[in-house]
Image: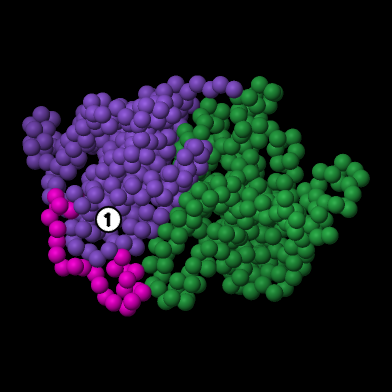
Chain colours: A green, B purple
């Protein structure tokens, strides 16, 4: 039978608690991985890499990061853009200071540096809750952007105040700088996205993730049953910022190539990632990917339809796009506050009963 | 001594900026108290109101850009101008209509949702309104003139010149804005305290269900509160728009109002005013004293950091209601 647990006997606890309990899901997952790693790198061209796939993967990483903090640990953050800037500037400083070390290590280190900064800005979360915290994280957003603008050391005293990624290679393939090829960029982002998604999934279903969720549902009650709020909240900030920092590093080094902090990592970026997790679904790894895909594809689609087909001027199309994104967010919140992930789950539940629903 | 006098001028300018912040913050507090919605769109409402005002005043054709792109026409203006008073009245009407639509299309469907969901809905609303304002009236920077006096206030300059030997530079527009804001605040407080609708509004703020059980219509109160917030946004939009032109950055004053709210407490009208003054003076003084040492432009973040540090010691803000949590 299609899409049934029936007949798929689990003989160990390990089998019983796997991520995809249904065989068809498992096959689908392996099939997607096979396509992503085995086929797309050979057929990808510059347009698809730059317009769709690379930003999708990078934003998926950022969305996972924010989802860990907001969706799992319940701490709303509006500072994502600022933390992405930390990742970007950290990787830039590392790349230029240690040109011989592999870029992959730089990106990971940038993630760790961002995690440290995230913990610092997460400290007030022990006292401040809810909206007050959301607004407090704006302090991180504005302060960090200002810092990277005003202190020339961060952008190596370049005249324009911009940072530009030099060419760096992985296995003799350029992945940053102007010489990087589409498959190389795509694969680097894919490896990071895959590894981090695996990490996020396993963290969130382990004891750490359960502590985060307990804090999210009610922090005082969680404290009474023995969850240390200091550790739980700060670890959420650390892990979340690690993800966001890596996303920022990749966004700058691999995708943009050159960045000006106010423009690339402004408050709008924070909202963009927040929208991704709302539309995708709070507290869901799949939702992070779905939300990122949705909000990366939507502007491309709208632009193609409005400018390409209808022949409207680009500025008008940009304004209409704002309206559509805004309206979609409101519609999503009204119709399905739990996002695309919930729709996906409902569809799967329906499929399991098909063709004999009760 | 010179430094001290400069400092005093900075403080005065700060106080006036603070009043403007308080004006925006007031809109937030009103809506938050009455409906528990943290309205991020308040700043965009101010932008939208200012855009509409300019559009009506100059007789612009709404959606001209869109109509032209679709039908190949070249409309732009009706060719008349509307007197300022009438334009303001018409804009206020538009804001009431907007409040009604928001209640009907958005809030009504989100009753009983978590506050954070409501907050995010208003962010979506902010995006929508921003796009709508641009599509309706065009995105170019416009000048707004409803006849408010502008330029340096000669009287204050003369008086201070005779007192200190240095004439303070105070914009007459700022003085007027302070006056109007003070009047608006007084009117709002009076409205909330002494009218039937005001009392109903406070009842709703206190307890939705109890208010409903004594026959107060929640929907009416919400439309009313959003209309008042729209009106406050219009006033704020006129002030800021006259000062620095009607453009996208106008909507960013909402972001400035957030630390004001945190400092004052989300539920307190006096808090919004005192918070606005503290932030206004604080950021101007900080920029004046510390700014030159660290490269300037500290106004972008100072308010947030101040509010953050303050909240660590007093999580409910200056005048906020004490937060009591139970399991």
- Given residues A284 and B275, the one toward you in this image is A284
Quadrant location of the N terminus of chain A in the rendered image:
bottom right
Q: Residues within 10 Å of mark 1 (few under 14, many from 20)?
A: many
Seen in the image, is B112 located left or right of residue B176? right
- Given residues B299 and A67, the one toward you in this image is A67
State the residue at coordinates (48%, 23%): B323
Q: Secondary structure at mark 1?
A: helix
Q: Quadrant of residue A99?
A: bottom right
State the residue at coordinates (74%, 62%): A32
Residue B283 in view in this figure: no
**In this rendering, is residue A331 above or below B304?**
below
Seen in the image, is B184 located left or right of residue A57? left
**In this rendering, is residue B171 above or below B53?**
above
**In this rendering, is residue A30 above or below B174?**
below
State the residue at coordinates (59%, 56%): A292
The spot of residue B8 in percent (x, y) is 22, 31
The spot of residue A164 in percent (x, y) is 54, 60
The spot of residue A235 in percent (x, y) is 65, 35
Q: Which residues are magenta?
A: B63-88
The spot of residue A321 in percent (x, y) is 44, 62
Q: Is residue A76 magenta?
A: no
Seen in the image, is A59 located left or right of residue B135? right
Q: Is residue B64 magenta?
A: yes
Q: Chain of mark 1?
A: B
State the residue at coordinates (53%, 68%): A301
* Residue linked to disc 1: B51
């Amino acid at each position: 039978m299609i899409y049934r647990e029936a007949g798929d006997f689990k003989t160990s606890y390990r089998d019983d608690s796997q991520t995809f309990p249904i065989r068809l899901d498992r096959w689908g997952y392996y099939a997607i991985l096979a396509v992503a790693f085995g086929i797309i790198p050979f057929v990808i061209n510059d347009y698809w890499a730059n317009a769709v796939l690379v930003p999708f993967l990078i934003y998926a990483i950022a969305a996972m990061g924010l989802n860990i903090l907001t969706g799992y640990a319940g701490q709303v953050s509006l500072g994502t853009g600022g933390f992405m800037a930390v990742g970007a500037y950290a990787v830039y400083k590392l790349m230029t200071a240690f040109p011989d070390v592999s870029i992959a290590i730089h990106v990971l280190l940038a993630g760790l540096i961002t995690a440290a900064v995230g913990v610092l800005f997460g400290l007030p979360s022990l006292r401040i809750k809810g909206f007050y915290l959301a607004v407090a994280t704006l302090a991180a957003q504005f302060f960090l952007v200002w810092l990277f603008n005003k202190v020339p050391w961060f952008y190596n005293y370049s005249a324009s105040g911009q940072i530009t990624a030099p060419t760096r290679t992985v296995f003799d393939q350029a992945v940053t700088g102007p010489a990087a090829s589409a498959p190389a960029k795509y694969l680097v982002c894919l490896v990071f996205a895959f590894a981090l998604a695996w990490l996020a999934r396993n963290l969130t279903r382990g004891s750490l993730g359960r502590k985060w969720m307990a804090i999210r549902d009610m922090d005082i009650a969680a404290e009474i049953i023995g969850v240390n709020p200091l550790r739980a909240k700060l670890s959420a900030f650390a892990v979340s910022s690690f993800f966001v920092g890596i996303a920022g590093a990749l966004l700058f080094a691999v995708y943009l190539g050159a960045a000006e902090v106010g423009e690339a990592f402004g408050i709008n970026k924070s909202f963009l990632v927040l929208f991704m997790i709302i539309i995708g679904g709070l507290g869901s790894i799949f939702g992070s990917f779905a939300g990122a895909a949705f909000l990366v594809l939507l502007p491309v689609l709208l632009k193609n339809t409005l400018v390409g087909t209808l022949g409207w001027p680009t500025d008008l199309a940009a304004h209409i796009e704002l309206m559509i994104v805004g309206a979609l967010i409101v519609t999503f919140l009204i119709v399905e506050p739990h996002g695309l992930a919930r729709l996906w789950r409902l569809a799967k539940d329906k499929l399991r009963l098909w063709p004999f629903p009760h | 001594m010179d430094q001290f006098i400069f400092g005093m001028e900075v403080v005065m300018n700060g106080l006036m900026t603070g009043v403007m912040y308080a004006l925006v913050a007031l809109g937030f507090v009103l809506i938050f108290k009455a409906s528990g919605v943290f309205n991020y769109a308040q700043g965009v409402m101010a932008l939208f109101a200012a855009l509409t005002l300019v559009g009506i005043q100059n007789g612009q054709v709404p959606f001209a850009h869109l109509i032209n792109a679709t039908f190949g026409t070249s409309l732009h203006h009706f060719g008349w101008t509307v007197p300022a008073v009438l334009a303001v009245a018409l804009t206020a009407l538009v804001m009431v209509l907007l409040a009604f639509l928001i209640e009907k299309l958005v809030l009504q469907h989100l009753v009983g949702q978590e506050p954070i969901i409501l907050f995010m809905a208003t962010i979506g609303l902010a995006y929508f309104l921003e796009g709508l304002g641009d599509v309706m009236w065009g995105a170019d920077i416009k000048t707004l003139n409803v006849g408010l006096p502008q330029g340096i206030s000669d009287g204050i300059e003369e008086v201070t010149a005779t007192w200190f030997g240095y004439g303070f530079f105070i914009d007459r527009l700022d003085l007027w804005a302070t006056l109007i804001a003070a009047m608006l605040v007084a009117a709002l407080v009076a409205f909330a305290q002494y009218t039937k609708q005001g009392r109903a509004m406070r009842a709703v703020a206190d307890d939705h269900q109890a208010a409903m059980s004594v026959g107060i219509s929640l929907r009416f109160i919400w439309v009313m509160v959003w209309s008042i917030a729209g009106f406050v946004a219009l006033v704020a939009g006129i002030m800021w728009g006259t000062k620095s032109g009607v453009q996208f950055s106008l909507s960013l004053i909402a972001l400035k109002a957030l630390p004001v709210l945190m400092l004052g407490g989300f539920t307190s009208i006096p808090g919004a005013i005192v918070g606005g003054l503290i932030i206004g003076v604080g950021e101007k003084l900080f920029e004046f004293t510390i700014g030159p040492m660290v490269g300037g432009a500290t106004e972008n973040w100072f308010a947030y950091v101040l509010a953050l540090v303050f909240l660590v010691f007093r999580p409910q803000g200056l005048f906020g209601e004490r937060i009591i949590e139970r399991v």
